[in-house]
Image (cartoon, rainbow, N blue to C red):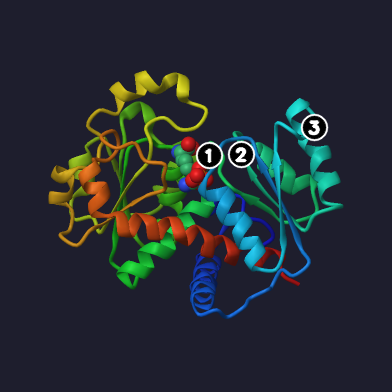
């Protein structure tokens, strides 16, 4: 594994290896066992979109690993004034040991990896959010003890979160059902991958998708960059909400995850959110541990 660009690139074995290391790093952190695997290394973090969790967890994680994180807002970089990503990649590769990038187009991340000579980590694009889904898988295994026999149901937009969840959950052996409006399905590349699995189903009925689910997951109706479509999306996604009615058809011990930020009473009711806050905030914490594992796998000597 040279980069983390998208879940589609990872083998099942690589995913499990990352999760095992993440569990170990979490244990070590809680028990005060130092793990300075990245002593003297520098991670550049390029942000073209806002972030709370991704920024703080990468920055803190790098510090805990003995390395140095550099926050690079695209507003301040020449990339924000049109310097090609191909040149940025070749320059930054001469200073840094790794780059985390959050941006719009997946191609920009893939280009950084192609033209640079250091590990690239995707911290969210319009296409996918692999760091989040590694934390989600870590949380599911932490609460359920296994992936075997579990069904993950995603309700809402066929967006970056849906794309990475579909691929990640299928790769670790879970059944996957998704419910999204007909005009907001995941892209063909994801559906082509998912349709190879008999345990994948897609519907426009949230009720049907949630039946017997062990894990219910949703995400905002309008993602970053889609603010102008917010009103139109509110209409299109009405009914695509995790609420008591959906929880009633899922397994009685079903867990609920949300990558955050959440919009209460839109994609999830405040009641369901608060009832599952322990899972949702453990998931947020696990961003730290999962990303530290990714950085160690990619950047340690
Ligand atoms: N879930 C997530 O990526 O959060 P941020 O946008 O705050 O980084
Ligand atoms: N789908 C959301 C996820 C935020 C972490 C977005 O792209 O804005």
Helix, strand or loop status at disc 3: helix
Please determine whether, in this image, residue 294 is positioned above or below residue 275.
below
- Residue 2 placed where, x, y %? 69, 60
Q: Considering depth in this image, is 178 or 244 the residue closer to the camera?
A: 244
Q: Quadrant of residue 87?
A: top right
- Residue 177 placed where, x, y %? 30, 48
Q: Does label 3 or label 2 sit earlier along the sequence?
A: 3
Which residue is located at x 27 percent, y 47 percent? 273
Pointers 1 and 3 in contact (C-beta within 8 Å): no
- Residue 228 placed where, x, y %? 46, 19
Helix, strand or loop status at disc 1: loop
Pointers 2 and 1 in contact (C-beta within 8 Å): yes
Q: Considering depth in this image, is 72 or 84 the residue closer to the camera?
A: 72
Q: Residues within 10 Å of mark 3 (few under 14, many from 20)?
A: few
Pointers 3 and 2 in contact (C-beta within 8 Å): no
Q: Does label 2 or label 1 sit earlier along the sequence?
A: 2
Q: CA distance from mark 3 to mark 2?
A: 19 Å
In the picture of the structure, the residue carrying the numbered disc 3 is 78
Which residue is located at x 54 percent, y 42 percent? 51
Q: Residues within 10 Å of mark 2 (few under 14, many from 20)?
A: some
> What quarter of the picture does the N terminus occupy?
bottom right
Q: Is residue 172 visible?
A: no
In the picture of the structure, the residue carrying the numbered disc 1 is 127
Helix, strand or loop status at disc 2: helix
Along the horizontal axis of the image, is 33 left or right of 205?
Answer: right
In the picture of the structure, the residue carrying the numbered disc 2 is 106
Q: CA distance from mark 2 to mark 1?
A: 6 Å
Which residue is located at x 39 percent, y 22 percent? 230
Along the horizontal axis of the image, is 300 left or right of 78?
Answer: left
């Amino acid at each position: 594994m040279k980069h983390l660009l998208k879940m589609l690139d990872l083998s099942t074995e690589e995913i499990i290896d990352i999760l095992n290391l993440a569990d170990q790093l979490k244990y070590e952190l809680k028990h005060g066992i130092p793990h300075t695997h990245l002593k003297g290394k520098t991670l550049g973090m390029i942000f073209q979109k806002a972030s709370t969790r991704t920024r703080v967890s990468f920055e803190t994680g790098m510090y805990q690993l003995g390395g140095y994180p550099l926050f690079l807002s695209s507003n301040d970089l020449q990339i924000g004034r049109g310097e090609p990503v191909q040149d940025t990649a070749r320059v930054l590769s001469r200073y840094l040991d790794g780059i985390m990038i959050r941006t719009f187009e997946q191609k920009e991340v893939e280009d950084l990896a192609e033209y640079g000579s250091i590990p690239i980590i995707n911290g969210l694009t319009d296409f996918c959010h692999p760091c989040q889904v590694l934390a989600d898988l870590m949380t599911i295994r932490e609460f359920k003890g296994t992936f075997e026999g579990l069904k993950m149901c995603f309700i809402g937009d066929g967006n970056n979160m849906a794309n990475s969840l579909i691929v990640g959950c299928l790769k670790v052996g879970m059944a996957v059902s998704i419910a999204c409006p007909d005009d907001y399905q995941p892209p063909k590349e994801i559906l082509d991958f998912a349709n190879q699995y008999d345990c994948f189903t897609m519907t426009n009925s949230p009720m049907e998708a949630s039946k017997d689910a062990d894990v219910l997951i949703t995400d905002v109706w309008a993602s970053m960059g889609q603010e102008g479509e917010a009103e139109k999306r509110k209409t299109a996604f009405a009914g695509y909400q995790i609420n008591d009615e959906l929880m009633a058809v899922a397994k009685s011990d079903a867990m609920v995850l949300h990558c955050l930020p959440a919009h209460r009473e839109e994609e999830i009711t405040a009641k369901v959110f608060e009832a599952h806050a322990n899972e949702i905030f453990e998931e947020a914490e696990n961003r730290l541990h999962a990303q530290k594992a990714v950085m160690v796998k990619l950047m340690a000597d």
